[in-house]
Image (cartoon, rainbow, N blue to C red):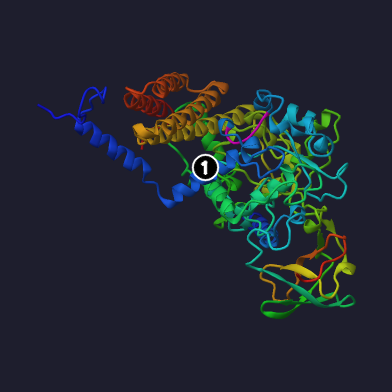
């Protein structure tokens, strides 16, 4: 008869078989055995989402929320309570003027930045969207130098990603417009900067895709062809493998800045609002009109698009490159100069939609990859760390919801969407169920993989 | 093909200009002396002003490794660090650089001519420039 781990039934109401105790102990040990790098990432996550740096209440996560792909948009903003620190300009008298424009924030997801100095706060500012910070590992350490933020020059100090948080605290976390360190905020410590950098670099993809992918579906497949065609879509010139690096035929030039003419778009929503919206001159002061190239794998889930949130949909963002603003810009003219027929980018409606469909599908594939990774991680957490496991499942659910959203909005792969919904339902059950959590999580992973198989041939 | 190569050459030249990326200048102004991330304690010079030559736009700063000559240009930013006085930092001028003042100087990257990208000058509680602590 098997010996029991309990001594007396009166003291131990539940008798647990010894092998089970041993197995659980091993699981706990395995779960606790994090590397120094993982510890630093975990510390960075904690700081990123919770540390206010004794400022106005904002954290990095206020504008880069985990549940919204680390960015904000009007739909997400509309879900926030009135006392959310995002709206601090609406309830803190010291920040009521010249800190944010609440109307442009709520309607278009725009944040105020004083990139050309703090000398004339009434007139000198720019309104920018919040870039997602996924896949930074693939873009930030460019051969052309360090790149942070929309214009590539977002960090003080040495201009590195590590230094970025210091500038963000000064610009966005301050209690008053005096911006006095030690009074209106405290600056991040060296250790905090290390941790935030490690966390930021851990987000999303750690490497670029290798295109072409063996995609299924006529439209996304054609979209990929156009994307890669250097005489038609020409997208792959500045977004190699749908990432954020450029290659004009002589090897990768890394993540680069371009003037694509976004500032010359007619009828930009923020301008139509009637609010003061000064032109944004991009990189450096005075600016040279260039902006940094963002990665495209995560694009479909993270609109609105461009530094000024000028375009709401991924289809509209692709169509931008067919328009006059782009083709008359320095970047558009460069492409035209390299074209045998002197054409920049000339696409028809079906081609625009096809490229967007391709971007939607690769976004969903990335969502699935992350969902599976998070679910697998949750399975490794063991019984003692079930709160962490639930958190991982929750993050996986966000990814799954994104994959459903980007596919559905493009009318793509309904069979895959059905599988993803099933995976979502199973993961929700797993989050609630302690006894069968592992089995349900495993089933959710299987459904994710089946969904993926609808999008791309297995390699 | 020639057009493509020409385009690439133009792009290369243009990107070459961008290669010397500097930190964002605007928020840097609000970072107290000695706390600039990735710069202070690594590549900047902290010390006291030994002499100033306004005509030649040069500065001599006495730091831990002796006196160093610094070149100022029209592009050099000068900021008054008033953090200790609990006052907002301000844009300064050459006139604010005086002998004995405590300063931090960031030199342009890979620059053999020791040209300053920015100079921060510490200011005391009275609002007057601070001597070396």
Q: Which of A443 and A392 is in front in this view?
A: A392
Which residue is pictured at 52% across the width and 33% down the height? A363
Q: In the picture, which quadrant includes the N terminus of chain A?
A: top left
Judged left or right of residue A422, residue A99 is right
Spot occupied by residue A129 in the image (x, y as percentages of width and height): 70, 37
Above or below for A242 versus A453? below
Spot occupied by residue B8 in the image (x, y as percentages of width and height): 64, 57
Which residue is pictured at 63% across the width and 35% down the height? A71
Q: Give the range drawn in magenta.
A: A69-73
Spot occupied by residue A57 in the image (x, y as percentages of width and height): 68, 37
SS of the residue under disc 1: loop
Local crowd size for mark 1, using a 10 Å CA cut-off: few (<14), some (14–19), many (≥20): some
- Residue A313 lies in the magenta-colored region: no
- Residue designated by label 1: A203
Q: Is residue B93 visible?
A: yes
Q: Mark 1 lies on which chain?
A: A
Q: In the picture, which quadrant includes the C terminus of chain A?
A: top left
Q: Nearer the viewer, residue A82 or A371?
A: A82
Find residue A344 and report its image quarter: top right
Q: Is residue A148 visible?
A: no
- Residue A70 lies in the magenta-colored region: yes
Farthest front residue?
A: A10
Find residue A101 and report its image quarter: top right
| Dominant secondary structure (helix, strand or loop) of the stretch shown in magenta | loop
């Amino acid at each position: 008869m098997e010996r029991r781990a309990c001594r007396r039934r009166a003291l131990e109401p539940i008798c647990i078989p010894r092998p089970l105790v041993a197995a659980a102990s091993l699981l706990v040990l395995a779960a606790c055995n994090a590397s120094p790098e993982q510890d630093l990432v975990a510390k960075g996550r904690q700081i990123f989402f919770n540390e206010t740096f004794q400022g106005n209440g904002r954290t990095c996560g206020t504008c880069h929320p985990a549940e919204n792909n680390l960015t904000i948009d009007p739909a997400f903003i509309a879900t926030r309570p009135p006392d959310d620190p995002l709206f601090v300009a609406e309830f803190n008298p010291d920040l009521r003027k010249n800190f944010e424009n609440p109307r442009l924030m709520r309607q278009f997801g725009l944040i105020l930045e004083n990139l050309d100095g703090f000398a004339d706060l009434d007139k000198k500012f720019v309104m920018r969207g919040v870039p997602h910070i996924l896949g930074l590992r693939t873009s930030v350490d460019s051969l052309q130098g360090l790149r942070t933020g929309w214009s590539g020059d977002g960090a003080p100090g040495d201009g590195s990603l590590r230094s970025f948080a210091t500038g963000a605290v000064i610009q966005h976390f301050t209690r008053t417009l005096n911006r006095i360190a030690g009074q209106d905020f405290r600056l991040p410590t060296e250790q905090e900067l290390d941790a935030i950098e490690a966390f930021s670099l851990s987000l999303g993809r750690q490497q670029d895709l290798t295109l072409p992918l063996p995609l299924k579906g006529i439209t996304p497949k054609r979209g990929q062809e156009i994307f890669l065609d250097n005489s038609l879509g020409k997208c792959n010139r500045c977004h190699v493998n749908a990432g954020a690096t450029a290659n004009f035929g002589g090897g990768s030039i890394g993540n680069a800045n371009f003037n694509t003419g976004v500032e010359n778009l007619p009828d930009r929503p923020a301008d139509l609002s009637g609010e003061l919206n000064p032109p944004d001159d991009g990189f450096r002061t005075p600016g040279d009109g260039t902006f940094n190239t963002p990665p495209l794998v995560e694009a479909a889930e993270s609109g609105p698009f461009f530094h000024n949130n000028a375009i709401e949909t991924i289809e509209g963002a692709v169509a931008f490159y067919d328009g006059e603003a782009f083709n008359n810009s320095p970047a558009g003219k460069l492409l035209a100069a390299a074209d045998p027929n002197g054409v920049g980018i000339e696409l028809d409606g079906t081609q625009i939609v096809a490229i967007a469909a391709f971007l939607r599908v690769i976004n969903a594939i990335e969502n699935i990859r992350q969902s599976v990774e998070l679910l697998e991680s949750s399975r490794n957490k063991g019984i003692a760390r079930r709160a962490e496991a639930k958190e991982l499942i929750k993050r996986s659910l966000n990814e799954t919801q994104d994959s459903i959203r980007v596919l559905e909005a493009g009318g793509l792969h309904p069979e895959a969407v059905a599988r993803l919904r099933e995976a979502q339902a199973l993961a929700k059950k797993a989050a609630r169920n302690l006894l069968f959590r592992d089995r349900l999580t495993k089933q959710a992973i299987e459904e994710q993989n089946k969904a993926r198989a609808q999008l791309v041939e297995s390699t | 093909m020639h057009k493509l190569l020409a385009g690439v050459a133009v792009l290369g030249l243009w990107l070459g200009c961008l290669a010397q990326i500097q930190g964002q200048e605007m928020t840097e102004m609000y970072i107290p002396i000695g706390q600039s991330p990735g710069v202070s304690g690594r590549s900047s010079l902290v010390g006291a002003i030994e002499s100033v030559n306004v005509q030649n736009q040069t500065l001599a700063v006495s730091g831990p490794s002796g006196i160093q000559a610094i070149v100022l240009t029209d592009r050099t930013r000068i900021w008054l660090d008033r953090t200790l006085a609990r006052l907002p930092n301000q844009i300064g001028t050459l006139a604010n650089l005086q002998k004995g003042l405590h300063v931090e100087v960031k030199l342009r990257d890979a620059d053999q001519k020791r040209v300053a990208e920015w100079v921060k000058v510490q200011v005391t509680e009275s609002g007057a420039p601070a001597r070396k602590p």
